[in-house]
Structure formats: C-alpha cells, structure tokens
Image (cartoon, grey):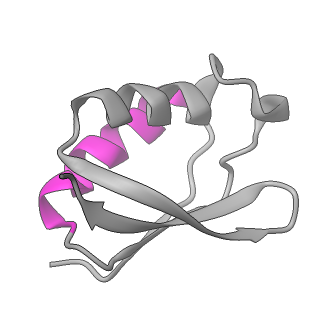
Amino acid sequence: MASLVCIDCNLYESYRDVLQWCDESLQAGAIVYSNDFNTFRAQPDRDPRRAWNEYLERTNWDFDPFLNVGWGARSFVVQTRD
C-alpha cells in the first residue's frame, strides 16, 4: 500500500494512466502529490486537470486538499468515500 504517491506528468494520457495504475495501491491517509497539477493555466478540460476530473468520477476514493506547492503543484489526502 502506498503512503505517498508523487505524480510528475503533464500530459493527459500519462496522467490518466498513472492515476489508474496507482488507484489499487492507495489507502486512507495517503498523500497524492501532483507536480504539474496546474499546467495549462489550470484549465479543467486540459491535460492533468482533465485526467484528474475523470478519475474522480470513477474512483472509490475521496481527496481532501492538502498543500499547494508553488503555483503548479498540489497535494491531497486520500479518504474513504462515505
């Protein structure tokens, strides 16, 4: 089980695949850190944000905002979905 997941991708396909791959390894309390979350001016329909929003629709996890790092990076705490 993962306690820290660091994602360093900024293209949609890579980001989508990483999220799908690591989903089984997550556990409540883990941290998901995305180095390039706000790439492409943080537009919700572009690359990292698009993949993240699609992932949120199909995962069984919830994610609470944790720390923002600089202008581009963001982290979340994994929580069980009620």
Quadrant in the rendering for residue 2:
bottom left
**Which residue is farthest front?**
82
**Location of residue 69 with respect to 47 vertically, above or below:** below
The magenta-colored residue range is 11-26
- Secondary structure mostly seen in magenta is helix
Give the x, y percent position of residue 49. 59, 33
**Location of residue 33 with respect to 37 vertically, above or below:** below
Q: Could you tell whether 39 is left or right of 8 in the image?
A: right
Residue lying at 48% horizontally and 61% vertically, measured from the top left: 64
Give the x, y percent position of residue 17. 32, 38
Residue 27: in magenta span = no
Q: Could you tell whether 52 is left or right of 41 in the image?
A: left
**Location of residue 6 with respect to 82 vertically, above or below:** below
Give the x, y percent position of residue 1. 14, 78
Give the x, y percent position of residue 31. 43, 75
Count all numbered tags in the image, as a single digit: 0
Quadrant in the rendering for residue 69:
bottom right
Q: Could you tell whether 51 is left or right of 70 in the image?
A: left
Residue lying at 66% horizontally and 61% vertically, measured from the top left: 74
Residue lying at 33% horizontally and 46% vertically, measured from the top left: 19
**Location of residue 12 with respect to 75 vertically, above or below:** above
